[in-house]
Image (spheres, coloured by chain):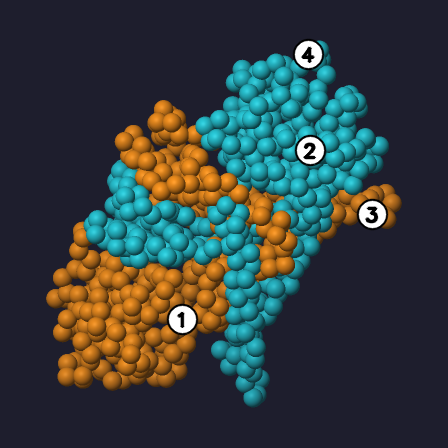
Chain colours: A cyan, B orange
């Protein structure tokens, strides 16, 4: 795939009907190149006209029979709309983009829908903004697009949905709906709950207390800025898998709280005689952090390959336009590839801390390159 | 303060004795300029010789009387060493760098130490590496340095420790030990526990599941890579405040688990008649995420000022040396100041996603500047 040309030839896909022209639906139309073979529909006339006007396709007048229907409706109406589309277009394959999959299949089964022609999907892409105006042809480039066939899905229709994902520049990943829902509970829904739980503690913190916030708490709570209504829908739709993971997490949390209580009693001397020693409490704490080390290492590194840990080189950056350009110019001149990068601002000072992650083998070369070019490496 | 010259004139500080020449102690010596007025001591002859050799100061031969003693020992021996130093140097002010403060004061009081001359400190700085060889004169530049006087601390000695922090380029922040410990429980220790709890869930996840990990779970679990032994010490030393915050967090977590269980029963139809509706469950979930929004907004923005939310512009980046330089060159040329930056790699593809945060007012200008220079803004 060339970066310059998102969207592969569309011949294989035939006529694609998109139901729901919000951010995802409109972006799919744009990425397919719009035109006469992309038919658009939406219950909101305004959203529909906007999607047409940005070039996502033509308004569906019922004149053409679609080969593929993409339902891009809100999660809580997805199953109903998919069932309607399966009924209205008896030869078409129907897919969707909802972020939880098993519930859709179960609701379709209970409605007696033709499940052979339904292949669920979940593009792992999004933006902070929503609606057709925020849409982008590049939205799916390089992102995973999970495809969730059931045991009864027609294999040719599964291939058809994979071709859609590939045409949009995404990386198709196939797994059963149950496995998808358990996976997103682990890597998306539970982290969201944890971020919100930690951030909620800050509401009543004093100003001096929050002034000590560093990069750690910023990272842990970044996704706590998410939309409450959307997340209530997502968590409710995946209640079983999320609850299972949160119960495990609570068991570990209970152990930590118990260990801390025992240590508090040990420190205060308590009232017991002989004084209680918090046997094993420090071990409980160390074991949790060690388990976190192990879990963290499961997250794949760059390019989906083996997890890699990088060396981090931190440089001081005066807070002026052009300084990052100069830094990256100097790194590029040294022929060093940056694996990860983050920029942190020092509280109360016009100085940034640039954290440059590189392969461990080139750490020394990077430090030397920066120092000889006048950077303060800290 | 000039970036080029960390370390202010040292005349005011007199003779400084540093006990413990690990990363922090050695960095303090370096930042003070080393030389004859910085006396070094450490129970390890190797660590002591290394600190001397990198230029952090001279080995203390007992010939000079210190004006200020900085104890940079491991947290679990800090109180004992501070008490010894107060006793051995009856005219000196003694400070320390331990990350939990109230326990040190309590232990000193129970040892009958001269608390008027003790002023605790906590520089909020560190590196991934430890030991004297990892030390840097710039380590404290722009970082908060919390100073924790007690009711009996001599005000002139508090000012002396503030001068030390300022001389090292840090931003001194004064608060009582109890308030410091409650603050770091909120902004450092509880986020660490939460990150470890979430990361620990990934240990038994399947490879396809972790392949779906995006930036959210990476951010939430980044600090889960921390050292278990050190963190067991820190959490144990701050057991009371950490336990209090974790209990609040558990109460909210219990509400979430209960709401999810009610939703699961509603979805399955349950066995009750009439079928139970999970009244209020979605509201519980939405309220938690909304509380997270509010808490997240408490974290101060750049330069310790009012919290600011930035606009994020995402650009696609071919994975080759020099691309980041070109990106930042183009941004600098447009005269736009980058507030925050992160780089994410797309799984399985040689493409990076560069997320550039800027003030909302210049979002349009940045997008235009990038697009006209040939970047794919997504």
- Residue B270 is labelled as 3
Residues flagged by tags 3 and 4 on a common chain: no
At numbered mark 1, what does the secondary structure look like: helix, strand or loop? Answer: helix
Q: Where is residue B297 in the image (x, y as percent from the top left)?
A: 45, 44
- Rounded to the nearest angstrom, the CA distance separating label 1 from label 4 is 73 Å
Q: Do the residues labelled 1 and 4 touch (CB within 8 Å)?
A: no
Q: Which residue is drawn at 46% across and 39% down?
A: B351
- In this view, the residue in front, B34 or A207, is B34
- Mark 3 neighbour density, 10 Å: few (under 14) some (14–19) many (20 or more): some
Query: Is residue B36 among the parts visible in the rendering?
Result: yes
- Mark 4 neighbour density, 10 Å: few (under 14) some (14–19) many (20 or more): few
- Residue A61 is labelled as 4
Q: Where is residue A29 in the image (x, y as percent from the top left)?
A: 58, 23
Q: Which residue lies furthest to the left in this view?
A: B11
Residue corresponding to mark 2: A159
> Label 3 marks which chain's residue?
B
Camera-near label (3 vs 1) is 3
- Mark 2 neighbour density, 10 Å: few (under 14) some (14–19) many (20 or more): few
């Amino acid at each position: 795939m060339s970066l310059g040309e998102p969207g592969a030839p569309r011949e294989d896909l035939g006529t694609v009907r998109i139901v729901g022209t919000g951010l995802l639906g409109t972006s799919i139309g744009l990425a397919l190149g719009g035109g006469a073979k992309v038919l658009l529909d939406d219950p909101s006339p305004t959203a529909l006209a906007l999607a047409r006007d940005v070039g996502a396709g033509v308004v569906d007048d019922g004149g053409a029979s679609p080969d593929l229907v993409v339902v891009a409706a809100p999660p809580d109406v997805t199953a109903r709309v998919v069932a309607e589309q399966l009924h209205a277009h008896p030869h078409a394959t129907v897919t969707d983009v909802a972020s939880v999959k098993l519930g859709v299949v179960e609701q379709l089964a209970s409605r007696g829908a033709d499940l052979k022609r339904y292949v669920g999907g979940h593009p792992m892409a999004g933006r902070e903004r929503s609606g057709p105006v925020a849409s982008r042809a590049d939205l799916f480039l390089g992102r995973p697009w999970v495809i969730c066939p059931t045991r009864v899905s027609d294999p040719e229709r599964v291939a058809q949905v994979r071709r859609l994902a590939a045409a949009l520049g995404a990386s198709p990943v196939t797994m059963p709906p149950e496995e998808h829902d358990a996976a997103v509970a682990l890597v998306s829904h539970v982290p969201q709950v944890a971020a919100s739980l930690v951030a909620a503690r800050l509401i009543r913190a004093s100003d001096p207390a929050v002034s000590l916030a560093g990069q750690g708490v910023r990272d842990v709570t970044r996704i706590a800025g998410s939309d409450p209504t959307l997340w209530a829908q997502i968590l409710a739709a995946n209640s079983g898998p999320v609850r299972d993971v949160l119960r495990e997490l609570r068991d570990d949390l209970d152990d930590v709280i118990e260990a801390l209580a025992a240590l508090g009693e040990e420190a205060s001397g308590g009232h017991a005689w002989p004084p209680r020693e918090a046997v094993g409490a420090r071990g409980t704490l160390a074991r949790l952090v060690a388990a976190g080390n192990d879990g963290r290492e499961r997250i794949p590194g760059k390019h989906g390959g083996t997890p890699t840990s990088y060396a981090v080189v931190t440089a001081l950056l005066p807070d002026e336009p052009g300084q990052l350009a100069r830094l990256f110019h100097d790194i590029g001149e040294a022929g060093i590839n940056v694996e990860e990068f983050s920029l942190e601002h020092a509280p109360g000072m016009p100085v940034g801390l640039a954290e440059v992650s590189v392969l461990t083998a080139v750490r020394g070369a990077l430090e030397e390159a920066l120092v000889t070019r006048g950077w303060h490496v800290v």
